[in-house]
Amino acid sequence: MSLSWQPSCSLELIQLRAKLLHEIRAYFYVNKVLEVETPLLCQSVGTDPYLEYFTSRYSISRQDYYLQSSPEFAMKRLLAASTGSIYQITKAFRNGESGRYHNPEFTMLEWYRVGFDLQQLMGDVEDLLSPLLTAECFSGKAECIAYVDVFKKYTGLNALQFDAAEYQACAERLGFPEAARLCALNHALWLDFLFSHVVQQHLGQSRLCMVFDYPVCLPSLARLKSDDARVVERVELFIQGIEIGNGFFELADVNEQIRRFDQDIMDRKNNGAVKIDKDERFLAALQSGLPDCSGIAIGIDRLLMIISQKSAIDEVLAFTIENA
Amino acid sequence: MANYSTSEFKAGMKIMLDSDPCAIIENEFVKPGKGQAFNRVKIRNLKNGRVIERTFKSGESVEAADVVDIDMQYLYHDGEFFHFMQLESFDQFQADENAVGDAKLWLKDQAMCIVTLWNNAPISITPPNFVELEVSDTDPGLKGDTSGGGGKPATLETGAVVRVPLFIQIGELLKIDTRTGEYVSRAKA
């Protein structure tokens, strides 16, 4: 038996990908957002509690480098060096993530708009994506809904106030008796479980849906909302129940960033994940000053799935990890 | 017994769940943005055939179930147990009513079946997709009616009752699809 060498997607999809990348670049060119490149191999990487990384050894320094899980820190170093608004289309790597919507190596579009707040960024996202969603199933303007409201709508629960008994009763009523064991008393985990199992599938059925104002226990790298300390300025994008993007009004306070890194590092330790050190170069850039900006990352492969109405990521990749 | 991590999950894998042996039908990787990854798994309980969905945290380990499917010949029913034999080894196994379930409607002496063993004891029997069984009773008459419509019940030698065309007579050998319990055709004798 010979090994399969053919691409897993069709020629049509290879062409559609090229067209999509061209349209994205054209949008940012017109809007005067600068295209940049940052390294895939870096000495540091994000501290996300739930990410696994790839590493590779650099023979000269005999040091392990990380294949980047996101270009975020490097791009913020550029922003701190006064590049103005920037975007990048790059590969990102996340070990162990493989499935219908995941390939451990994937293509990411990430951009930052200097001087934009989250609302303005959401407008930018809609301007970019609306012309791309031409399939018949899409119609109308994007739907923007606060996390608390959409969570309440599908679970009946208050996302900002954790009540273990109420959350558990809700999960049981909805057919997820295992949630209590998995999530225990971890509010953030409960939110992730219920959102991904109950809420997400309803979002963006016929249009882009943007969920904003995330509960403060799911902060990632978003700023606290200035007039409501219970939420952070984070947005996630959904189309046809698929999560395609995650953005923030970017945290610029270096001390708060260090605090979140420390929290992540502690969470990683508790999860038994590999130890990751803080990216000191990134922290030094924040210290020197990150301009107020909002930024977002969009998964290009998933966006292609949606544009072409394919049901699995394999159908839009030339070669998946199994066939790479 | 060994353990499987969620990252090894794939269709066909046998695991223990709520103290019952189960087979994985489908495994979906679910990852909320920046959050804990989960595996949403569709599972068939091998004892009662019921299909359920269950979520695991990615990276969790689950006990493997010692389950194997073996071709065996059906020997006889002793009133309480159904007896099967593995032809190569002559090993014999007895299965109770629970394990045999609806398969008993299609079991004829010497028929080859798939016997699913859990910890070396039968938990389910899968008859061949098609079996040939003799009609032991059906309403006579109506001979010569070959129209497709209507039909009538016929009792087969195993006790199963199936709908057959009106022209079928007692003593005829019929081909039956055991997955649907439907008459397919007369068997060529």
Image (tube, coloured by chain):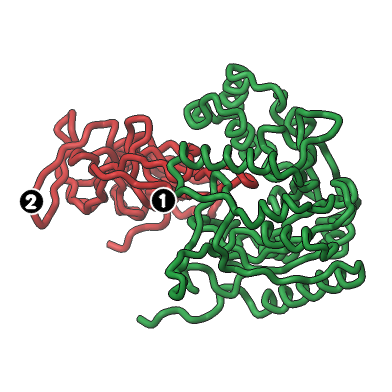
Chain colours: A green, B red
In the rendered structure, the residue with mark 1 lies on which chain? B
In the rendered view, does A64 fall on the left or right side of A32? left
Dot 2: chain letter: B
Q: Amino acid at mark 2?
A: Phe
The N terminus of chain A is located in which quarter?
bottom left
Image x and y of residue B49, in percent: 39, 38
Percent of width and height locating residue A323 = 48, 73
Residue type for callout 1: Phe
- Which residue carries the number 1 mark? B9
Do the residues indicated by labels 2 and 1 lie within the same chain of the protein? Answer: yes
Q: Residue at x 85, y 63 (%)?
A: A84
**Left or right: A157 as drawn, with respect to B173:** right
Determine whether the residue tagged by mark 2 lies in a helix, strand or loop: loop
Report x, y in % for residue B1. 23, 42
> Observer-nearest residue: A274 or A205?
A274
Residue drawn at x 73%, y 63% as measured from the top left: A109
How many residues crowd around disc 2 within 10 Å: few (fewer than 14), some, or many (20 or more)? few
Q: Is residue A282 above or below residue B79?
A: below
